[in-house]
Image: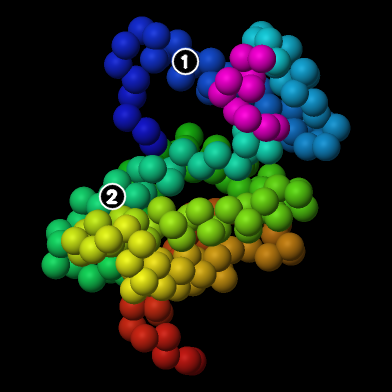
Amino acid sequence: MTAPPTSLRERKKAKTRAAIREHAMRLFEEQGYAATTVDQIADAAEVSPSTFFRYFPTKEDVVLVDDVDAVLLSAVRDQPAEVPPVEAILRGMRRVFDDMSPQTWEFERRRQRLVLGVPELRARMLHQMTSAIDMVAEVIAERAGLPADDFSARVTAGAAVGAMLAVLPSDGIDQAEGVTPGDYQRLEKALMLLQSGLPLG
């Protein structure tokens, strides 16, 4: 989802990062998140633990770092200035999800299944919502020519993030499926409901 690295050094770093993450996901799925150590992940990826920590500050971050975020924010930022903020988020989200390859969808399904299925990951994900509001608010304010800490931009961002959070699968998530494209359609529906003034029924 991110722009492809250009230099040889960047390509090597991207390859190492992807290998660490893929081996981590495989080990989490095979033996459980709690039972998997950083040393095991590093060994499987053929890197040292110190190299692991250069790419991911904690074991949690291997799962929680969302590569889609930066692409989504960029897509929202690219919307015409006259487009209202919630509509800009909706259009940006549609563009990003429509462009997702089957491989990216599969990785996101695996990643979100872990996040929603492991209590400590789910708890930290919810804690990170404040940072998500900050990032979205900054883009909304930027598009409107307002200060980054504008009150109305932050309230709008909070409403949008809250609407999306409200439709994520609950603790009853189907562990065989994880998050599916249908769940992202629900995110779109949530934003459309917010855009229309939250009518009930």
Determine which of the numbered discs, if any, sits on residue 116 in the image: none
For numbered disc 2, what is the local secondary structure? Answer: helix
Splitting the image into 4 quarters, where does residue 47 fall?
Answer: top right
Point 74% across, 33% down: residue:
28
Point 75% across, 23% down: residue:
38
Neighbor class of circle 2 (other Cα within 10 Å; few <14, some 14-19, many 20+) is: some
For numbered disc 1, what is the local secondary structure? Answer: helix
In this view, 36 is above or below 196: above
Q: Amino acid under label 2? A: Ala
The magenta stretch is 50-59
75 part of magenta stretch: no
For this view, does 131 lie left or right of residue 144? right
Q: CA distance from mark 2 to mark 1?
A: 25 Å
Point 55% across, 58% down: residue:
129
What is the x, y in percent for residue 42? 70, 16
What is the x, y in percent for residue 181? 49, 55
In this view, 72 is above or below 51: below
Which tag, 2 or 1, sits closer to the chain's start?
A: 1
The residue identified by callout 2 is 75
Splitting the image into 4 quarters, where does residue 35 fall?
Answer: top right
Q: Is residue 176 visible?
A: no
Q: Amino acid under label 1? A: Lys
**Total numbered badges shown on the rendered structure:** 2
Query: In this view of the protein, which residue sits in the foreground, 19 or 155?
Result: 155
56 part of magenta stretch: yes
In this view, 111 is above or below 76: above
Query: In this view of the protein, which residue sits in the foreground, 172 or 136?
Result: 136
Neighbor class of circle 1 (other Cα within 10 Å; few <14, some 14-19, many 20+) is: some
Which scheme is used to colour this image of the protein? rainbow
Judged by its main secondary structure, the magenta piece is helix
The residue identified by callout 1 is 13
Point 57% across, 71% down: residue:
166
